[in-house]
Image (cartoon, rainbow, N blue to C red):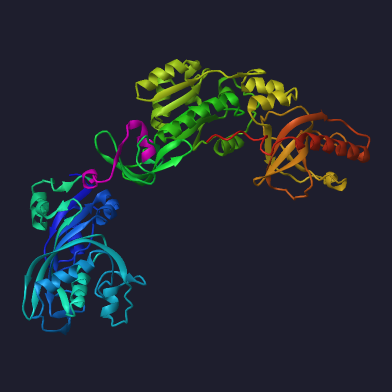
């Protein structure tokens, strides 16, 4: 059976609506609810929702309802129905059909109605019937309800006069209160002595099943009594989508729409087979008309589009791959991922890897912060991966580990033993697995082919114009600030110093206009990379950054230094006074350069 849908149930007199819900839940073993309470003495149409349809109950509950009710004039009760305690009696023999027909029109339209004290309406979080039974004094507040039509079907005069009426009304209407109020308009006590709901929206009594019938059909594996969700809410306009939208919908993302419905219109979203996927509302945004999803009724599809590579430097060539991922994510709603390797494969393949433009930790941070990457997978590059066949690489890594739906690689990507795997071979192997592959062409700029090798060559010459142009942002180093000899502080230029990690590519030794980032805040400054020859004592070069106009204790903290412009080579001075004067000139040069640079120029341009 389908575990999601509705049952048009014909409730018997005696049980509560919750009793029926509990019986269906035990029978079908699915999540169950109802779409509008019927009192124990009432019978008739009680729409039951099962499975995911429980999330749609209010759509059915809010629809127009039709009742056949029987009113007893000459006696009132505290519950306004036959189950309550009698509160007043009177002789109703003077009541005529004409008198009753004269007052009925006053109850058609939008009216203010006081609900019965014996009802499930909550006051202060407690149902009114519980408060009433505890003897609490109740303040009953009138509520606006709408009654579309009342027809008098039958009238029987007498000391206790009886009338059968047909009522068509909106959500929240109490027929018990209506009976009591009609009696009040006739100066007679009255109560509702019988009620049959014959219709709720498109759920009609003639098509309803009793609980016993549902039990019998279930016993013979006949679940034809379950109404599909989409059929039950067919009164709501439909939008049909193709498979390309499924992942976006499953993750609750907005989808585009060309429908001509009014803004804020509620719509049901179905696939081409008529399966209900979601509920949403039509909205207008800068891109046009969309469906903003409110309820998603399908399981999330964890489709993933993944770029594979070393991604050293995260330069503009890499960005071209990330833009493909971003488009995939925007169109299909898939997750975006990057698969990279540590250590660099050349460390094992050739015995020596190049110095890295970006260390692994910083690379992961920049991917997530700026390139709209949901997941970064770093694989330990070992001999098994190095010596794998192309087929094994695809099966073990792409299919089993990544579970990717789409792969993005560069034009020069190689994989498997001896680099036997080419982008074209990857495309063919993945196609057999139902996985798409996009191959991104080389990217060239004013300084030639954009690659980590080309960037390292320009970095070694301190050609930051070329480096930063090819990166698409300023070259950046990061590290943990270490304790120094505080000489900079003593001469009025306090610095934050850190050493580079092993195999870290670095600029030539010298002084640079820089921006220094700490804890999400960026400061203009000047940075020296080198051995500090005037002060001496350094075995390895380090970064020494001075932040303008602030004095922050950064010892033990991680900072990033973004290199904007090469100012001069590092040199030895005759003493601290000469060094102090030169630093002041360096600061002035850096300030002039940085003054014309937009606040976020040093950062990668964000995707998304």
Which quarter of the figure has residue 403? top left
Q: Per the image, is 245 magenta?
A: yes
Residue span colored magenta: 229-249
Which quarter of the figure has residue 268? top left
Q: Give the x, y percent position of residue 3.
A: 22, 47
Q: Is residue 493 visible?
A: yes
537 or 489: nearer the viewer: 489
Considering only vertical position in the picture, is 301 above or below 76? above
Figure quadrant of the N terminus: top left
Q: Give the x, y percent position of residue 204.
A: 14, 53
Considering only vertical position in the picture, is 464 above or below 524? above
206 or 553: nearer the viewer: 206
Drawn side of residue 472 relative to residue 439, left or right: right
Drawn side of residue 95 relative to residue 120, left or right: left
Q: Per the image, is 398 magenta?
A: no
240 or 100: nearer the viewer: 100
Q: Give the x, y percent position of residue 369.
A: 57, 39
Considering only vertical position in the picture, is 288 above or below 141? above
Which quarter of the figure has residue 363? top right
Drawn side of residue 394 relative to residue 503, left or right: left
Q: Residue at x 37, y 21 (%)?
A: 431
Q: Residue at x 13, y 46 (%)?
A: 223
Q: Give the x, y percent position of residue 482.
A: 73, 44
Q: Residue at x 59, y 36 (%)?
A: 366
Q: Is residue 79 visible?
A: no
């Amino acid at each position: 059976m389908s575990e999601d849908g509705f049952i048009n149930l014909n409730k018997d007199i005696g049980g509560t609506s919750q009793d029926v819900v509990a019986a269906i839940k035990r029978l079908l073993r699915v999540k169950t609810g109802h779409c509008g309470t019927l009192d124990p003495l009432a019978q008739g149409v009680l729409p039951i929702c099962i499975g995911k349809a429980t999330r749609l109950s209010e759509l059915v509950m809010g629809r127009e309802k039709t009742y056949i009710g029987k009113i007893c004039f000459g006696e009132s009760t505290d519950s306004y129905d036959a189950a309550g305690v009698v509160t007043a009696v009177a002789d109703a023999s003077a009541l005529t059909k004409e008198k009753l027909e004269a007052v009925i029109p006053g109850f058609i339209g939008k009216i203010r109605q006081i609900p019965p004290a014996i009802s499930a309406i909550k006051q202060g979080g407690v149902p009114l019937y519980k408060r009433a039974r505890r003897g609490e004094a109740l303040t009953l507040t009138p509520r606006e309800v709408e009654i579309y039509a009342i027809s008098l079907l039958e009238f029987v005069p007498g000391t206790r006069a009886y009338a059968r009426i047909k009522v068509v009304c909106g959500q929240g209407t109490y027929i018990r209160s209506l009976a009591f109020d009609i009696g009040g308009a006739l100066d007679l006590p009255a109560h509702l002595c019988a009620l049959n709901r014959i219709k709720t929206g498109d759920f009609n009594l003639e098509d309803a099943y009793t609980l016993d019938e549902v039990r019998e059909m279930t016993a013979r594996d006949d679940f034809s009594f379950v109404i599909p969700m989409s059929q039950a809410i067919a009164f709501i306009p439909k939008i049909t989508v193709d498979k390309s939208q499924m992942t976006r919908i499953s993750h609750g993302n907005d989808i585009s729409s060309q429908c001509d419905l009014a803004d804020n219109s509620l719509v049901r979203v179905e696939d081409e087979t008529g399966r209900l996927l979601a509920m949403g509302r039509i909205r207008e945004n800068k891109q046009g008309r969309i469906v903003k999803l409110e309820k998603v009724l399908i399981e999330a599809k964890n489709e993933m589009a993944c770029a594979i590579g070393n991604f050293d430097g995260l330069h503009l060539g890499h960005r071209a791959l990330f833009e493909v991922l971003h488009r995939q994510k925007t169109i299909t709603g898939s997750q975006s991922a990057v698969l990279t390797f540590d250590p660099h494969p050349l460390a094992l393949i050739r015995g020596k890897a190049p110095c890295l433009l970006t260390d692994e930790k910083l690379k992961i941070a920049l991917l997530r912060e700026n390139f709209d990457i949901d997941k970064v997978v770093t694989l330990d590059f070992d001999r098994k991966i190095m010596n794998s066949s192309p087929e094994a690489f695809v099966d073990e890594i792409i299919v089993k580990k990544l579970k990717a739906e789409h792969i993005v690689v560069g034009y020069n990507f190689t994989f498997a033993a001896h680099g036997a795997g080419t982008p074209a071979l990857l495309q063919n192997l993945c196609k057999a697995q139902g996985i798409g592959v996009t191959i991104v062409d080389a990217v060239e700029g004013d300084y030639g082919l954009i690659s980590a090798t080309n960037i390292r060559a320009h970095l070694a010459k301190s050609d930051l114009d070329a480096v930063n142009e090819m990166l698409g942002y300023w070259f950046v180093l990061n590290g943990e600030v270490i304790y120094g000899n505080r000489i900079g502080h003593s001469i009025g230029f306090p610095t934050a110093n850190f050493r580079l990690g092993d195999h870290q590519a670095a600029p030539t030794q010298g002084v640079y206009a820089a921006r220094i980032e700490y804890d999400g805040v960026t400061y203009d400054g000047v940075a020296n990379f080198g051995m500090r020859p005037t002060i001496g004592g350094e075995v390895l070069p380090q970064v020494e950054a001075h932040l303008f106009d602030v004095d922050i204790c950064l010892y033990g903290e991680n900072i990033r230094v973004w290199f904007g412009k090469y100012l001069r080579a590092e040199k030895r001075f005759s003493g601290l006074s000469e060094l102090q004067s030169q630093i002041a000139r360096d600061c002035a040069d850096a300030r002039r350069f940085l003054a014309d640079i937009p606040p976020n120029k040093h950062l990668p341009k964000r995707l998304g």
